[in-house]
Amino acid sequence: MANDLTQLGRPAAIPASPQEAKLETVANPHPGTLYLVRFAAPEFTSLCPVTGQPDFAHLVIDYVPEARLVESKSLKLFLASFRNHAAFHEACTVGIAKRLIDAMAPQWLRIGGYWYPRGGMPIDVFYQSGPPPAGLWLPDQGVAPYRGRG
């Protein structure tokens, strides 16, 4: 364990807001190797900024690391900090991507925000930092389109 990690292996409360959350990173054990890291958060929650009602999403984050990896407990706490954060789907999804890019400077990153219906309509938000690197094995994100009860 790296000495500069403050959350892994220690009790850590969920931050009160995404702004207060600290994304920690660790050294990439395979620098110079082209590989994909995927995190899935199937129970992501935030709040509607107008009604205050909860919004739910299945997030899939894919990235190709450079020198640093995001530490998974800090990512979990960062994502959990959105549960009392009021923002539109687009602000949450793209904001998460930008924070991750700022924290670890990956070679490439994409996020799929598969949001459950609000007002009877699902809103999906997708962002990527650029074209995927040549030769990268990039599997489908595996989230089925919303079909309601059908």
Image: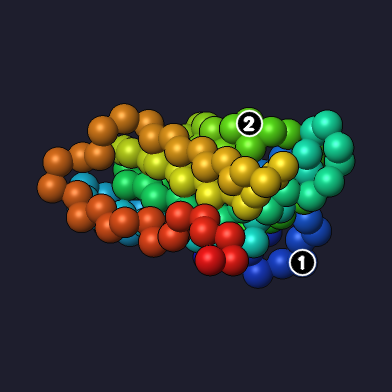
| Residue sitting at x 14%, y 41% | 134
- The amino acid sitting under disc 2 is Ala
Q: Residue 143, image x and y in percent?
A: 44, 59
The answer to whether residue 132 is visible is yes
| Residue sitting at x 37%, y 31% | 129
Q: Is residue 98 shown left or right of residue 133? A: right
Residue 91 got which mark? 2
- The amino acid sitting under disc 1 is Pro
Q: Residue 74, image x and y in percent?
A: 62, 54
Q: Is residue 63 shown left or right of residue 96? A: left
**Mark 2 packing: few (<14 Cα in 10 Å), some, or many (20+)?**
few
Q: Nearer the viewer, residue 146 or 6?
A: 146
Q: Residue 36, image x and y in percent?
A: 31, 54
Q: Residue 138, image x and y in percent?
A: 25, 53
**Residue 51 placement: quadrant:** top right
| Residue sitting at x 76%, y 61% | 12
Residue 64 got which mark? none
**Mark 1 packing: few (<14 Cα in 10 Å), some, or many (20+)?**
few
